[in-house]
Image (cartoon, rainbow, N blue to C red):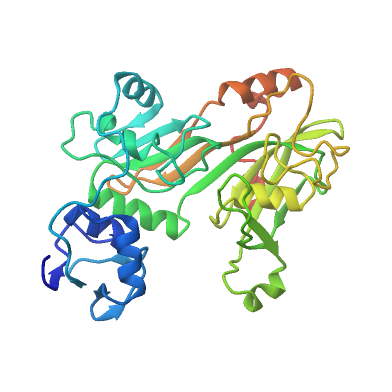
Amino acid sequence: MSGVQTITVAAGEGDQRLDRWLKRRFPQLNQGNVEKACRKGEIRVDGGRVKASSRVQEGQEVRVPPLPEDRAPAAPRRDKVTAADAEMIRSCVIYRDDHIIALNKPPGLASQGGSGQTRHVDGLGDALRFDSDEQPRLVHRLDKDTSGIMLMARNRLTAAQLSEAFRDRETRKIYWAAVAGTPHPRMGTVRYALVKAGGGGDGGEKMRTVLPDEVDDIPGAKRAVTDYAVLDTLGSRGAWLALVPVTGRTHQLRVHMAEMGHPIVGDGKYGGSGQENQGDGWGASFGGEISKKLHLHARHLSLTHPITGARLSLTAPLPDHMERTWKMMGWDGLDVPLDPFADEEA
Protein backbone atom coordinates (compact mmCIF):
# COMPACT_ATOMS: atom_id res chain seq x y z
CA MET A 1 0.00 0.00 0.00
CA SER A 2 1.43 3.36 -1.03
CA GLY A 3 1.16 6.54 1.04
CA VAL A 4 -0.66 9.76 0.22
CA GLN A 5 0.73 11.37 -2.92
CA THR A 6 0.39 14.85 -4.41
CA ILE A 7 0.92 14.79 -8.17
CA THR A 8 1.09 17.79 -10.47
CA VAL A 9 -0.75 17.49 -13.78
CA ALA A 10 2.06 17.61 -16.33
CA ALA A 11 2.29 19.53 -19.58
CA GLY A 12 0.17 17.84 -22.23
CA GLU A 13 -2.05 16.13 -19.65
CA GLY A 14 -4.54 18.96 -19.21
CA ASP A 15 -8.21 19.11 -20.17
CA GLN A 16 -9.05 15.47 -19.54
CA ARG A 17 -11.36 13.75 -17.09
CA LEU A 18 -9.93 13.11 -13.65
CA ASP A 19 -10.91 9.42 -13.69
CA ARG A 20 -9.11 8.82 -16.99
CA TRP A 21 -6.03 10.73 -15.84
CA LEU A 22 -5.86 8.64 -12.66
CA LYS A 23 -6.40 5.29 -14.39
CA ARG A 24 -3.64 6.01 -16.91
CA ARG A 25 -1.21 6.65 -14.03
CA PHE A 26 -2.51 3.88 -11.76
CA PRO A 27 -3.72 0.90 -13.85
CA GLN A 28 -4.75 -0.97 -10.67
CA LEU A 29 -7.64 1.48 -10.18
CA ASN A 30 -11.08 0.83 -11.58
CA GLN A 31 -13.96 3.27 -12.03
CA GLY A 32 -15.58 2.26 -8.75
CA ASN A 33 -12.36 2.95 -6.82
CA VAL A 34 -12.09 6.45 -8.26
CA GLU A 35 -15.74 7.40 -7.73
CA LYS A 36 -15.74 6.13 -4.13
CA ALA A 37 -12.55 8.02 -3.28
CA CYS A 38 -14.01 11.20 -4.79
CA ARG A 39 -17.24 10.83 -2.80
CA LYS A 40 -15.25 10.40 0.43
CA GLY A 41 -13.08 13.41 -0.38
CA GLU A 42 -9.92 11.29 -0.48
CA ILE A 43 -9.08 12.50 -3.97
CA ARG A 44 -8.81 16.28 -4.21
CA VAL A 45 -7.66 18.78 -6.83
CA ASP A 46 -5.93 21.92 -5.56
CA GLY A 47 -7.35 21.07 -2.14
CA GLY A 48 -10.97 20.98 -3.25
CA ARG A 49 -13.45 18.12 -3.53
CA VAL A 50 -14.10 16.89 -7.06
CA LYS A 51 -16.13 14.38 -9.04
CA ALA A 52 -14.67 11.58 -11.12
CA SER A 53 -15.90 13.43 -14.21
CA SER A 54 -14.19 16.72 -13.28
CA ARG A 55 -11.56 17.88 -15.77
CA VAL A 56 -7.98 18.45 -14.66
CA GLN A 57 -5.74 21.15 -16.10
CA GLU A 58 -1.97 21.51 -16.44
CA GLY A 59 -0.29 22.61 -13.21
CA GLN A 60 -3.11 21.50 -10.89
CA GLU A 61 -2.15 19.38 -7.88
CA VAL A 62 -4.04 16.14 -7.34
CA ARG A 63 -4.11 14.51 -3.90
CA VAL A 64 -4.09 10.72 -4.29
CA PRO A 65 -4.87 8.54 -1.24
CA PRO A 66 -2.94 5.35 -0.37
CA LEU A 67 -3.34 2.84 -3.17
CA PRO A 68 -2.83 -0.94 -3.32
CA GLU A 69 0.40 -1.88 -5.06
CA ASP A 70 -1.07 -4.79 -6.98
CA ARG A 71 -3.46 -4.47 -9.85
CA ALA A 72 -7.10 -5.12 -9.03
CA PRO A 73 -8.71 -7.96 -10.99
CA ALA A 74 -9.45 -6.53 -14.40
CA ALA A 75 -12.83 -6.85 -16.03
CA PRO A 76 -12.85 -8.89 -19.22
CA ARG A 77 -11.66 -6.73 -22.09
CA ARG A 78 -10.23 -6.94 -25.56
CA ASP A 79 -6.53 -6.22 -25.35
CA LYS A 80 -6.00 -6.75 -29.03
CA VAL A 81 -8.11 -5.54 -31.92
CA THR A 82 -8.97 -8.45 -34.19
CA ALA A 83 -8.08 -8.27 -37.87
CA ALA A 84 -11.79 -8.23 -38.77
CA ASP A 85 -12.53 -5.36 -36.35
CA ALA A 86 -9.48 -3.43 -37.56
CA GLU A 87 -10.62 -3.74 -41.16
CA MET A 88 -14.17 -2.73 -40.19
CA ILE A 89 -13.22 0.42 -38.26
CA ARG A 90 -10.71 1.53 -40.91
CA SER A 91 -13.41 1.18 -43.57
CA CYS A 92 -15.44 3.74 -41.58
CA VAL A 93 -12.84 6.50 -42.05
CA ILE A 94 -14.20 9.27 -44.30
CA TYR A 95 -11.50 11.88 -43.57
CA ARG A 96 -7.97 11.81 -42.13
CA ASP A 97 -5.13 14.28 -41.79
CA ASP A 98 -2.23 14.65 -39.34
CA HIS A 99 -4.56 15.88 -36.59
CA ILE A 100 -8.10 14.57 -37.10
CA ILE A 101 -9.86 11.36 -38.07
CA ALA A 102 -13.55 11.42 -39.04
CA LEU A 103 -15.55 8.19 -39.00
CA ASN A 104 -18.94 7.27 -40.37
CA LYS A 105 -19.93 5.22 -37.32
CA PRO A 106 -22.18 2.28 -38.15
CA PRO A 107 -25.38 1.73 -36.15
CA GLY A 108 -25.05 -0.79 -33.33
CA LEU A 109 -21.44 0.13 -32.47
CA ALA A 110 -21.08 1.91 -29.13
CA SER A 111 -18.85 4.98 -28.83
CA GLN A 112 -17.34 3.91 -25.50
CA GLY A 113 -17.42 0.99 -23.08
CA GLY A 114 -19.90 0.64 -20.25
CA SER A 115 -23.13 -1.25 -19.53
CA GLY A 116 -21.55 -4.48 -20.74
CA GLN A 117 -20.18 -3.00 -23.97
CA THR A 118 -16.90 -4.72 -24.86
CA ARG A 119 -16.73 -3.68 -28.52
CA HIS A 120 -16.76 0.06 -29.11
CA VAL A 121 -15.06 2.83 -31.11
CA ASP A 122 -12.81 3.87 -28.24
CA GLY A 123 -11.59 0.30 -27.82
CA LEU A 124 -10.83 -0.02 -31.52
CA GLY A 125 -8.68 3.12 -31.57
CA ASP A 126 -5.43 1.18 -31.80
CA ALA A 127 -6.39 0.18 -35.36
CA LEU A 128 -6.65 3.88 -36.24
CA ARG A 129 -3.12 4.93 -35.30
CA PHE A 130 -1.93 4.71 -38.92
CA ASP A 131 1.46 6.52 -38.88
CA SER A 132 1.04 8.06 -35.40
CA ASP A 133 2.60 6.94 -32.11
CA GLU A 134 -0.55 8.02 -30.25
CA GLN A 135 -3.90 6.30 -30.21
CA PRO A 136 -6.66 8.68 -31.38
CA ARG A 137 -9.06 10.07 -28.80
CA LEU A 138 -12.83 10.52 -28.98
CA VAL A 139 -13.93 14.15 -28.63
CA HIS A 140 -17.70 13.56 -28.71
CA ARG A 141 -20.11 10.63 -28.78
CA LEU A 142 -23.09 9.22 -30.63
CA ASP A 143 -25.69 6.87 -29.18
CA LYS A 144 -24.98 3.23 -29.96
CA ASP A 145 -27.82 2.93 -32.48
CA THR A 146 -27.23 6.36 -34.08
CA SER A 147 -24.99 6.31 -37.14
CA GLY A 148 -22.90 9.00 -38.77
CA ILE A 149 -19.99 11.37 -38.31
CA MET A 150 -17.74 11.04 -35.28
CA LEU A 151 -14.47 12.91 -34.82
CA MET A 152 -11.31 11.58 -33.18
CA ALA A 153 -8.25 13.64 -32.35
CA ARG A 154 -4.85 12.16 -33.20
CA ASN A 155 -3.02 13.92 -30.36
CA ARG A 156 -3.78 15.50 -26.99
CA LEU A 157 -3.48 19.12 -28.17
CA THR A 158 -6.00 18.61 -30.97
CA ALA A 159 -8.29 16.73 -28.56
CA ALA A 160 -8.32 19.67 -26.16
CA GLN A 161 -9.08 22.18 -28.91
CA LEU A 162 -11.80 20.06 -30.51
CA SER A 163 -13.42 19.43 -27.11
CA GLU A 164 -13.50 23.17 -26.53
CA ALA A 165 -15.07 23.74 -29.96
CA PHE A 166 -17.86 21.26 -29.16
CA ARG A 167 -18.44 22.78 -25.71
CA ASP A 168 -18.57 26.30 -27.16
CA ARG A 169 -20.88 25.15 -30.00
CA GLU A 170 -18.45 26.25 -32.67
CA THR A 171 -19.36 23.17 -34.69
CA ARG A 172 -22.39 22.78 -36.97
CA LYS A 173 -24.07 19.35 -36.79
CA ILE A 174 -26.99 18.32 -38.99
CA TYR A 175 -28.76 15.00 -38.48
CA TRP A 176 -31.22 13.24 -40.77
CA ALA A 177 -34.12 11.30 -39.31
CA ALA A 178 -37.31 9.56 -40.42
CA VAL A 179 -40.22 10.17 -38.05
CA ALA A 180 -43.81 9.04 -37.65
CA GLY A 181 -46.27 11.67 -38.85
CA THR A 182 -45.48 15.10 -40.26
CA PRO A 183 -44.58 17.97 -37.91
CA HIS A 184 -46.42 21.28 -38.20
CA PRO A 185 -45.15 23.85 -38.73
CA ARG A 186 -42.64 22.37 -41.17
CA MET A 187 -39.75 24.27 -39.58
CA GLY A 188 -39.35 25.21 -35.95
CA THR A 189 -37.49 24.93 -32.66
CA VAL A 190 -38.11 22.60 -29.70
CA ARG A 191 -37.11 24.00 -26.29
CA TYR A 192 -38.07 21.36 -23.73
CA ALA A 193 -35.47 20.90 -20.99
CA LEU A 194 -34.30 17.38 -20.13
CA VAL A 195 -33.69 15.47 -16.90
CA LYS A 196 -32.83 11.86 -16.13
CA ALA A 197 -35.97 9.77 -15.78
CA GLY A 198 -34.54 6.39 -14.77
CA GLY A 199 -36.11 3.14 -15.87
CA GLY A 200 -34.41 2.85 -19.23
CA GLY A 201 -35.82 -0.66 -19.59
CA ASP A 202 -32.74 -2.09 -21.33
CA GLY A 203 -30.49 -0.98 -18.50
CA GLY A 204 -29.60 2.23 -20.25
CA GLU A 205 -30.23 5.81 -19.33
CA LYS A 206 -33.57 7.41 -20.10
CA MET A 207 -34.54 11.08 -20.16
CA ARG A 208 -37.81 12.97 -19.78
CA THR A 209 -38.83 16.48 -20.74
CA VAL A 210 -39.33 19.49 -18.46
CA LEU A 211 -41.11 22.70 -19.40
CA PRO A 212 -38.62 25.56 -19.88
CA ASP A 213 -40.17 27.66 -17.10
CA GLU A 214 -39.85 24.76 -14.64
CA VAL A 215 -36.20 23.90 -15.25
CA ASP A 216 -34.87 25.94 -12.31
CA ASP A 217 -37.15 24.07 -9.91
CA ILE A 218 -36.11 20.53 -10.90
CA PRO A 219 -32.67 19.29 -9.77
CA GLY A 220 -30.57 18.00 -12.63
CA ALA A 221 -32.74 19.49 -15.36
CA LYS A 222 -30.82 21.08 -18.23
CA ARG A 223 -32.07 23.36 -20.97
CA ALA A 224 -32.13 21.77 -24.43
CA VAL A 225 -32.80 23.29 -27.84
CA THR A 226 -33.33 21.52 -31.18
CA ASP A 227 -34.01 23.07 -34.59
CA TYR A 228 -35.94 20.93 -37.07
CA ALA A 229 -36.96 21.20 -40.71
CA VAL A 230 -39.19 18.90 -42.79
CA LEU A 231 -37.34 17.93 -45.98
CA ASP A 232 -39.95 15.59 -47.50
CA THR A 233 -42.99 13.59 -46.43
CA LEU A 234 -44.87 10.35 -46.94
CA GLY A 235 -48.22 12.08 -47.01
CA SER A 236 -49.22 12.59 -43.37
CA ARG A 237 -47.82 9.22 -42.29
CA GLY A 238 -44.14 10.04 -42.02
CA ALA A 239 -41.47 12.62 -42.72
CA TRP A 240 -37.79 13.08 -43.43
CA LEU A 241 -36.34 15.68 -41.07
CA ALA A 242 -33.13 17.64 -40.73
CA LEU A 243 -32.28 18.18 -37.05
CA VAL A 244 -29.74 20.51 -35.46
CA PRO A 245 -28.95 19.95 -31.76
CA VAL A 246 -28.24 23.51 -30.62
CA THR A 247 -27.39 22.01 -27.23
CA GLY A 248 -25.93 18.53 -26.79
CA ARG A 249 -27.92 16.67 -24.15
CA THR A 250 -28.26 12.90 -23.76
CA HIS A 251 -30.84 11.50 -26.22
CA GLN A 252 -31.89 15.08 -27.00
CA LEU A 253 -33.10 14.59 -30.57
CA ARG A 254 -34.93 11.37 -29.77
CA VAL A 255 -36.74 12.81 -26.74
CA HIS A 256 -37.64 16.09 -28.44
CA MET A 257 -39.14 14.33 -31.46
CA ALA A 258 -41.13 11.95 -29.26
CA GLU A 259 -42.40 14.87 -27.16
CA MET A 260 -43.62 16.55 -30.36
CA GLY A 261 -45.61 13.40 -31.12
CA HIS A 262 -43.29 12.38 -33.96
CA PRO A 263 -40.94 9.70 -32.61
CA ILE A 264 -37.98 8.66 -34.72
CA VAL A 265 -38.58 5.45 -36.65
CA GLY A 266 -36.95 2.48 -34.94
CA ASP A 267 -36.68 4.16 -31.52
CA GLY A 268 -37.73 1.48 -29.08
CA LYS A 269 -36.93 3.58 -26.03
CA TYR A 270 -38.84 6.76 -26.84
CA GLY A 271 -41.22 5.64 -29.59
CA GLY A 272 -43.12 2.64 -28.27
CA SER A 273 -46.61 1.81 -29.46
CA GLY A 274 -48.10 3.78 -26.58
CA GLN A 275 -46.45 6.99 -27.78
CA GLU A 276 -49.08 9.52 -28.83
CA ASN A 277 -48.13 10.71 -32.30
CA GLN A 278 -49.39 11.76 -35.69
CA GLY A 279 -48.53 8.39 -37.23
CA ASP A 280 -51.83 6.60 -36.52
CA GLY A 281 -50.50 4.96 -33.37
CA TRP A 282 -47.59 3.13 -34.97
CA GLY A 283 -45.19 4.41 -32.37
CA ALA A 284 -41.79 4.42 -34.02
CA SER A 285 -42.44 2.01 -36.86
CA PHE A 286 -43.47 2.56 -40.48
CA GLY A 287 -44.45 -1.09 -40.72
CA GLY A 288 -44.19 -3.27 -43.78
CA GLU A 289 -40.68 -3.88 -45.08
CA ILE A 290 -39.20 -0.78 -43.40
CA SER A 291 -36.34 -1.64 -41.05
CA LYS A 292 -37.03 -1.41 -37.33
CA LYS A 293 -33.53 -0.08 -36.68
CA LEU A 294 -33.19 3.50 -35.45
CA HIS A 295 -33.46 5.99 -38.35
CA LEU A 296 -31.18 8.71 -36.97
CA HIS A 297 -27.95 9.65 -38.75
CA ALA A 298 -25.34 12.35 -38.11
CA ARG A 299 -25.26 13.47 -41.74
CA HIS A 300 -23.13 16.61 -41.83
CA LEU A 301 -20.53 18.30 -39.64
CA SER A 302 -18.71 21.55 -40.27
CA LEU A 303 -16.10 23.21 -38.08
CA THR A 304 -12.96 25.29 -38.19
CA HIS A 305 -9.92 23.03 -38.24
CA PRO A 306 -8.21 23.55 -34.87
CA ILE A 307 -4.70 23.52 -36.36
CA THR A 308 -4.92 24.83 -39.93
CA GLY A 309 -7.79 27.25 -39.39
CA ALA A 310 -9.48 26.05 -42.59
CA ARG A 311 -13.21 25.37 -42.65
CA LEU A 312 -13.79 21.61 -42.66
CA SER A 313 -17.05 20.26 -44.10
CA LEU A 314 -17.82 16.53 -43.75
CA THR A 315 -20.78 14.48 -45.00
CA ALA A 316 -21.48 10.83 -44.14
CA PRO A 317 -23.45 8.46 -46.43
CA LEU A 318 -26.56 6.86 -44.95
CA PRO A 319 -26.27 3.38 -43.40
CA ASP A 320 -27.76 0.53 -45.39
CA HIS A 321 -31.09 0.31 -43.53
CA MET A 322 -31.76 4.05 -43.94
CA GLU A 323 -30.63 3.98 -47.57
CA ARG A 324 -33.22 1.27 -48.25
CA THR A 325 -35.93 3.29 -46.49
CA TRP A 326 -35.06 6.44 -48.44
CA LYS A 327 -35.27 4.52 -51.75
CA MET A 328 -38.59 3.00 -50.78
CA MET A 329 -39.97 6.43 -49.87
CA GLY A 330 -38.56 8.07 -53.01
CA TRP A 331 -36.44 10.46 -50.95
CA ASP A 332 -33.18 11.67 -52.54
CA GLY A 333 -30.45 13.63 -50.81
CA LEU A 334 -29.69 15.45 -54.07
CA ASP A 335 -33.12 17.09 -53.87
CA VAL A 336 -32.51 18.94 -50.60
CA PRO A 337 -29.98 21.58 -49.48
CA LEU A 338 -27.04 20.50 -47.36
CA ASP A 339 -28.13 22.99 -44.68
CA PRO A 340 -31.87 23.71 -44.95
CA PHE A 341 -31.59 26.26 -42.14
CA ALA A 342 -29.09 28.49 -43.94
CA ASP A 343 -31.68 30.73 -45.63
CA GLU A 344 -33.61 30.99 -42.37
CA GLU A 345 -30.51 32.23 -40.54
CA ALA A 346 -29.39 34.66 -43.25
Is residue 8 left or right of 268 when viewed as pictured?
A: left
Is residue 292 left or right of 157 when viewed as pictured?
A: right
Residue at 44% across, 42% down: 116
Q: Nearer the viewer, residue 204 or 155?
A: 204
Residue 273 image-quadrant placement: top right
| Residue 17 visible within the image | no
In the rendered image, residue 88, in percent from the top left (x then y), is placed at: 38, 22
Q: Nearer the viewer, residue 83 or 211?
A: 83
Q: Is residue 58 above or below residue 129?
A: below
Residue at 64% across, 60% down: 197
Q: Nearer the viewer, residue 233 or 238?
A: 238
Quadrant of the frame with the N terminus: bottom left
| Residue 10 visible within the image | yes
Q: Nearer the viewer, residue 218 or 10?
A: 218
Farthest bottom residue in view: 47
Residue at 70% across, 40% down: 264
In the rendered image, residue 341, in percent from the top left (x then y), is placed at: 64, 46
In the rendered image, residue 46, in percent from the top left (x then y), is placed at: 23, 78
Residue at 31% across, 37% down: 77
Q: Is residue 72 above or below residue 51?
A: above
Residue 170 image-quadrant placement: bottom left
Is residue 229 left or right of 152 when viewed as pictured?
A: right
In the rendered image, residue 345, in percent from the top left (x then y), is placed at: 63, 52
Q: Number of labelled discs?
A: 0
